[in-house]
Amino acid sequence: MRKVLLGLASVASLIFAAFTLSPWPSVYAIRLIFDKGAANASAKLEKHVPASVTASTYQYDPSSSDALLDVYRPAKSIAGAPTVVWIHGGGFVSGRRSDLTNYAKILAGQGFNVVNIDYTIAPEAHYPTPIRQVNQALAFLTRNGGKLGVDSNRLVLAGDSAGAQIAAQSAAVVTDADYARRVGVSAGARPSQIIGALLFCGVFDVTRTGSGWFMKTTTWAYSGKRNWRDAPGFETISVASNVSRNFPPSFISAGNADPLASQSLAMADALKAKGVSVDTLFYPADYKPPLGHEYQFDLDTAAGRLALERSTRWLRALVR
């Protein structure tokens, strides 16, 4: 019995060491949970996907196998409509562009060309690699917009969850040269090309994310340090405290039961304080059924349909 107990203690010690010496064990757990959730959300959207949308895939950086993007085109696009460049979420440690395929097609079916970007997730890559990759994708679209059939002079950076943060930070990098220098990323487009930011359920201020298991894991994996405060430059990830008056007009939304809802509210307030035009879709605290993280992807609910309606209405208002 004593040997059994000693053996169990040794196993427990090894497990404890694995979770405290590296973010990888926790990252694997998050990926398992998030990948299943993303697959379920995508499957529910299948019946809403229009048949008339076509898709093409391109590699925006030949040096990276992760640097792929899809372009979705409607049968008939809205004249003068912007191109929506969507960045997937996943807590910086999970997700892939295929998670967004069905939603991107649905959005394209509303009359917009939609670009769906992949980037290298953490811990395979650390901050600010995704910001750099998105800007490489923007440079690719700028060079090849005519061949791709997209308007690269009228881009809306969009994203959900971590993707919303990456989209917002990329918009800030493009529109604020001083911030781009502090982040250490070269802008992949001119400020005039980014005409909007469409942000769902994002995390915009790392200093307000709390210290729970999930946040500890994701900031460790993304920053490369157990305590992100020990990672030089990582504080620039807090885009809400770094926005300028040149940030593009924005649409921001989150569910009333989303643990990150306060982040979206704070981001909207920060932009408004700079004089940036902001349209928002938030819900009363007692809204039922409670709307959790990524509520907008459930088009079987009234709130999900409203989010699509309101965001596409906002996009149409950007038509020149």
Image (cartoon, rainbow, N blue to C red):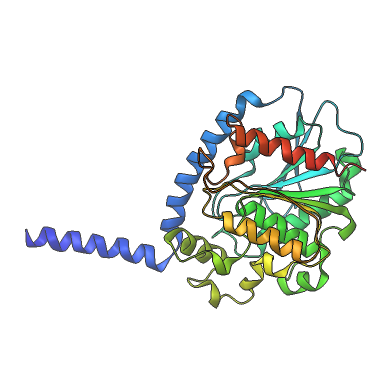
Taking the image as shown, residue 34 lies to the left or right of residue 113, namely left
User: Which residue corresponds to the image point at 10% horizontal and 61% vertical from the top-left?
Assistant: 3
Picture quadrant of residue 12: bottom left
From the viewer's perspective, is residue 87 above or below residue 113? below
Q: Which of 80 and 187 is in front in this view?
A: 80
Q: Residue at x 64, y 43 (%)?
A: 97
Q: Is 207 placed above or below 168 here?
A: below
> Foreground residue, 225 or 170?
170
Answer left or right for 25 relative to 79.
Answer: left
Q: In the image, is residue 141 above or below residue 214? A: above
Across and down, in percent, residue 160 comes to: 64, 48
The quarter of the picture where residue 278 lies is: bottom right
Residue drawn at the location 56% of the way across and 63% of the way down: 222
Asked if 112 appears above or below 274 in the picture, the reply is above
Q: Residue 146 placed where, x, y %?
A: 91, 42
Residue 190 can be seen in this image: no
Q: How many marks?
A: 0
Is 44 on the left-hand or right-hand side of 243?
Answer: left
Q: Which quadrant does the C terminus fall into? A: top right
**Residue farthest to the left?**
1
For the question of whether residue 280 can be seen, the reply is: yes
Out of 189 and 140, give the one closest to the viewer. 189
Point out the image quarter for the N terminus: bottom left
Residue 177 in the image: x percent, y percent?
82, 70
Residue 25 x/y as whole percent: 41, 57
Judge left or right: residue 317 versus residue 51.
right
| Residue sitting at x 71%, y 55% | 167
